[in-house]
Image: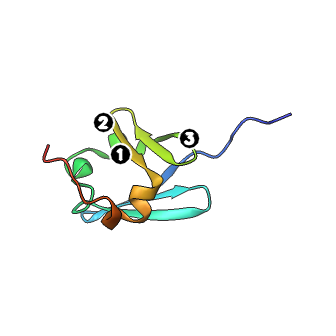
Amino acid sequence: MLGTATLVPEVTHISKHGFWILWADEEFLLPFDQFPWFRKENIDQISEVEAPTSNHLYWPQLDIDLSVDSIRKPEDFPLVSAT
């Protein structure tokens, strides 16, 4: 019988340059210049993050969805929304 998933993503640090998120066994840096949607948001909004699947992170207060692959290798995902 499968158990309930207990791992949750956690924002571990926020600076003026970006923020770090711990997910599973990895810690990622999301620099604001590569992930501009987060730049002007507050700590509570950035810190509330969910993992609907093992390769998908979601910030419900901001309605932002990111694949973990786009965080690992943002250069493989060059299109960035202007909004």
Q: Residue at (24%, 44%) from the top-left corner?
A: 41
The CA span between labels 3 and 1 is 18 Å
Report the amino acid beneath label 3.
Thr
Name the residue furthest right: 1
Residue 2 on image: x %, y %:
81, 36
Numbered disc 1: secondary structure: helix
Circles 3 and 1, Cβ within 8 Å, touching? The answer is: no
Numbered disc 2: secondary structure: loop
Q: Which residue is tagged 1?
A: 46
Residue 62 on image: x %, y %:
30, 36
Q: Which residue is tagged 3?
A: 53
**Label 3 packing within 10 angstroms: few (<14), some (14-19), many (20+):** few
Disc number placed over residue 24 in the picture, else none = none
Disc number placed over residue 62 in the picture, else none = 2
Q: Is residue 83 left or right of residue 26?
A: left
Circles 2 and 3, Cβ within 8 Å, touching? The answer is: no
Ranked by sequence position, the earlier of labels 2 and 3 is 3
The CA span between labels 1 and 2 is 8 Å
